[in-house]
Image (tube, rainbow, N blue to C red):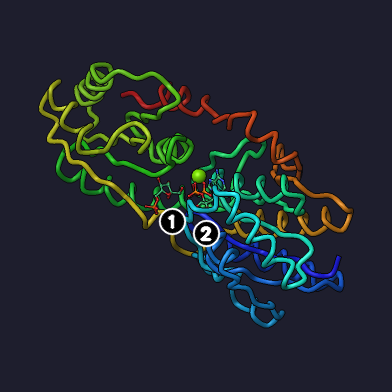
Amino acid sequence: MKRIGILTSGGDAPGMNAAVRAVARKAMAEGLEAYGINYGFAGLVAGDIHKIEAADLDGVVNQGGTLLYSARYPEFAHEEGQLKGIEQLKRFGIDALVVIGGDGSYHGALRLTEHGYNTIGLPGTIDNDIPYTDFTIGFDTAVNTDVEALDRIYDTAHSHDRTFVVEVMGRGAGDVAMWAGLSVGADAIVIPELDWDMETIANKIKHNRANGHRCNIVVLAEGVMGADEFVEKLSQYGDFDARANTIGHMQRGGRPTAKDRVLASKMGAYAVELLLDGKGGLAVGIQDNQLVNHDILDLFNSKHKAELSLSKLNEDISFN
Ligand SMILES: Nc1ncnc2c1ncn2[C@@H]1O[C@H](COP(=O)(O)OP(=O)(O)OP(=O)(O)O)[C@@H](O)[C@H]1O
Ligand SMILES: O=P(O)(O)OC[C@H]1O[C@](O)(CO)[C@@H](O)[C@@H]1O
Ligand SMILES: [Mg+2]
């Protein structure tokens, strides 16, 4: 093996650059060359591919976004594009590919593996919705961004005796909402993985208010419903002077936390070690603070297990 290709795909996630750097620099340290593919699978098919020099990676470890750019390119679900992508990799003499992205990107990585092209996946997504990893690259930063936003919203909620329903990202997963909600002492955290009931939430808010809690924060995972709709339904159970906020894409940007930088660096270097060991068709994860790898295919026969006990814990300690 002489050349490793790297691409980032799906939504950008803070720490993707640290992962690209780790893959490329580890490859170089092992006497290999690294090639960057711009714009995920779209750039792969188009042949938007260039050699990465060590100096290109200077000053990127602390940058959000992705220096390789990203794309949503649904066309890659078609075999024609997949075969074209492999042809491009061969044209550049690239022997193996590291795909940094979320569950959708893993589908792309699996297709390449099925066509006999050696591919390794790194979990790069703020959603934390990937099986066989406790954490994904970008999740910690997104949660911390949400916590900062929620702390600010709390100031206004407290000053005006208001209830704020704050929608956070996570697609179908409630991890971002649980971590952010527990971190700010939310009155309620509403996620798609667990049953919930509007009347119970309204009663909790009333109970807390009756016992001296001046304002309320409800953290709502986007996979449940939008914040406006939630406020409308909540208001049917009482006048909470409620406001809806959606944090939105600011959750995706910004400098990665140290935790995301370290995770990305470890995973990136590990991917190269796996390839040097002659392995491939694998997804890298971290479980109980140990780097692990699983067949990419296994990820599609499993479901991400959210740490749902966080929701129960929040219930237990968020009453007045
Ligand atoms: N079934 C599939 N077959 C081949 N490629 C796919 C498939 N599904 C997704 N992809 C490729 O992966 C890309 C990224 O997928 P998606 O938009 O779901 O984001 P993701 O990787 O899950 O990241 P995130 O959820 O963080 O945005 C798609 O745009 C497409 O190029
Ligand atoms: O940036 P887009 O394409 O609007 O996608 C938003 C989605 O991407 C994510 O930010 C990352 O998967 C999700 O949390 C969100 O649902
Ligand atoms: Mg995804």
- Please state which of residues 250 and 303 is positioned toward the viewer in this rendering: 303
- In the rendering, at what x and y percent does residue 230 appear? 23, 31
Question: Residue at point 79% right, 63% down?
Answer: 95
The reply, left or right, for residue 231 in relation to residue 249 is: left
Q: Could you say which disc has been placed on residue 14 in the image? A: 2
Quadrant containing the N terminus is bottom right
Q: Which picture quadrant has residue 190?
A: top left
Instruction: Say which residue label 1 marks.
Output: 252
| The residue carrying mark 1 has its beta carbon less than 8 Å from ligand 2 | yes
Quadrant of image for the C terminus = top left
Separation of marks 1 and 2 at Cα, in angstroms: 7 Å
Q: Nearer the viewer, residue 130 or 135?
A: 130
Amino acid type of the residue tagged 2 in the rendering:
Pro
Which residue is rendered at x = 77% and y = 71% of the image? 93
Q: Nearer the viewer, residue 217 or 9?
A: 9
The x, y position of residue 286, in whole percent, is 70, 43
Q: Earlier in the sequence, mark 1 or mark 2?
A: 2
